[in-house]
Amino acid sequence: MPVAHRIGSIPGAQLVQMRILELALHAADLSRGTGHDWPVDESLAAFIAEELGDLIIALGAEGGYRPPRPLDKGASAAQRVLLLSGW
């Protein structure tokens, strides 16, 4: 079901995904800013990296985001999310 959003009408499922990203990535920003580790659950990070990675790139493209550098095969899911997000 479409919902109104400031970027336009978007599917409700996409808005839920955007909110997951918003909360998780703002928590990462706050953690970095306060000098703490990002306390993200690895299964949540894996979900974000695997299921929402394309959305991160698509949303970022609107603001001039460039695709991330190649991901290290040994990177944790949390590290992959941060790399996808431009960290």
Image (spheres, helix red, strand yellow):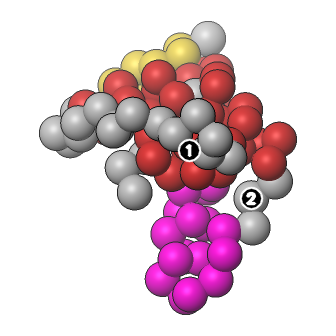
Residue 25 on the magenta span = yes
Crowd class of label 2 (few under 14; some 14 to 19; many from 20; radius 10 Å): some
Q: Are marks 2 and 1 in contact (CB under 8 Å)?
A: yes
Q: Residue 35 location, x and y as percent?
A: 56, 87
Crowding near pointer 1: few (<14 within 10 Å), some, many (20+)? many
Image label count: 2
Q: Is residue 55 above or below residue 80?
A: above
Which residue is pictured at 58% across the width and 28% down the height?
52
In the image, is residue 53 above or below residue 75?
Answer: above
Q: Is residue 39 above or below residue 55?
A: below
Amino acid carrying mark 1 in the image: Val
Q: Is residue 43 left or right of residue 15?
A: right
Callout 2, which amino acid? Val
Q: Residue at x 35, y 26 (%)?
A: 58
Residue 59 seen from this side: no
| Quarter-of-image position of residue 67 | top left
**Quadrant in which the N terminus is drawn:** top right
The magenta-colored residue range is: 19-38
Q: At 72% across and 32% down in the image, what residue appears?
A: 47
Of pointers 2 and 1, the one earlier in the residue sequence: 2
Q: Name the dominant secondary structure of the magenta segment.
A: helix
Q: Which residue is mark 2?
A: 40
Secondary structure, mark 2, is loop
Disc 1 designates what residue? 81
Residue 64 drawn at (x, y percent): 16, 39
Look at the numbered disc 1 and give the secondary structure of its residue: helix
The location of residue 48, given as percent across then percent down, is: 65, 36
